[in-house]
Image (tube, helix red, strand yellow):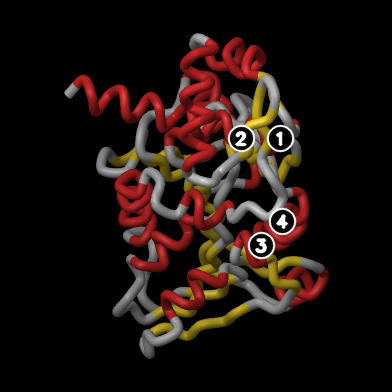
Amino acid sequence: MTSNVHAVLAERRHQLILRALRAGGPAAVTDLSEQLGVSPATIRRDLVKLEEDGLLTRVHGGAVVEEGDQPFAEVAEVRVNEKDAIAERAAAMIRDGQSVLLDIGTTAYRLARQLHGRRLTVITSNLVVYEELADDEGIELVLLGGMVRREYRSLVGFLTEDNLRQLHADWLFLGTSGVRPGGQVMDTTVVEVPVKRAMIKAGEKVVLLADAAKFPGHGMAKVCGPEELDAVVTNEPVDAATRASFQEAGVEVVVAGKGQA
């Protein structure tokens, strides 16, 4: 039991270290130690493990995430059980015959896996979602055009946004890099933000998919405020400040497996 707890804590630190490096470039061991509240020795062990996994490069006194990383591949197998619980609950919201817009990211991909055998229209800029559903003849599949971002397995740019202006979906299931205590949905990948905003305009009901690691959130670019969401599906109750922000905005918070929070 104790080893499992340690594994979870280490995984969470690794996520936060990678997020900090992407947001601010190279980071010193001392800075990371202070931010995460652990010893420099622990941070050094974390950096060694992350470098062995090919996720960063250690430099003198710290580490850096190199350009050319593959963020989708990196996170595709992280917190799979949590994402699957969220995906299963989100899939239950959808009725056969409806249209569903799926955002980029790994949680949207896990949701796509739940849609097999359904009679739906699925619209997406997520190449992994497209690959997952391409052979399912019950699903009318619409792939948005745009510039391919290979490392994120997504399509972006003015072509994607223009396609979205021509479409309307019953549901949008939106991903995020994190959620601020004020309920603002954030993203660390600036080029994806205009596409996400266009998706919000195209969706009748907007549902944010965010596991517990997204609270409190990070990201330098604001996608939307809580007032543009209809619901949030997560796997654990959100913190009090964020919950209050959602309640004030009239956003339903659904904890997977537990109903409304």
Q: Position of residue 221 (x, y in %)?
A: 75, 41
Give the residue type at disc 2.
Answer: Arg
69 on left or right of 146: left
Q: From the viewer's perspective, is the residue at label 2 or at label 3 nearer?
A: 2
Q: Measuring 60% from the left and 40% from the top, which residue is drawn there?
A: 56
Mark 4 touches mark 1? (CB < 8 Å)? no
Q: Which mark is residue 23?
A: 1
> Circle 4 is placed at which residue position?
192
Q: From the viewer's perspective, is the residue at label 4 or at label 3 nearer?
A: 4
Q: Position of residue 191 (x, y in %)?
A: 77, 55
Q: Is residue 258 visible?
A: yes
Extreme residue toward the front, this view: 60
Location of the N terminus by quadrant is top left
Decide: is 134 above or below 161. below
Helix, strand or loop under label 3 = helix
Q: From the viewer's perspective, is the residue at label 4 or at label 1 nearer?
A: 1
Helix, strand or loop under label 4 = helix
Q: Measuring 69% from the left and 45% from the top, which residue is drawn there?
A: 66
Q: From the viewer's perspective, is the residue at label 2 or at label 4 nearer?
A: 2
Location of the C terminus by quadrant is top left
Give the residue type at disc 1.
Answer: Ala
Q: Which mark is residue 19?
A: 2
Give the residue type at disc 3.
Answer: Met
Decide: is 137 above or below 13. below
Q: Is residue 247 visible?
A: no
Q: Position of residue 53 (x, y in %)?
A: 48, 44
> Circle 3 is placed at which residue position?
199
C-alpha distance separating marks 2 and 3? 25 Å
Helix, strand or loop under label 2 = helix
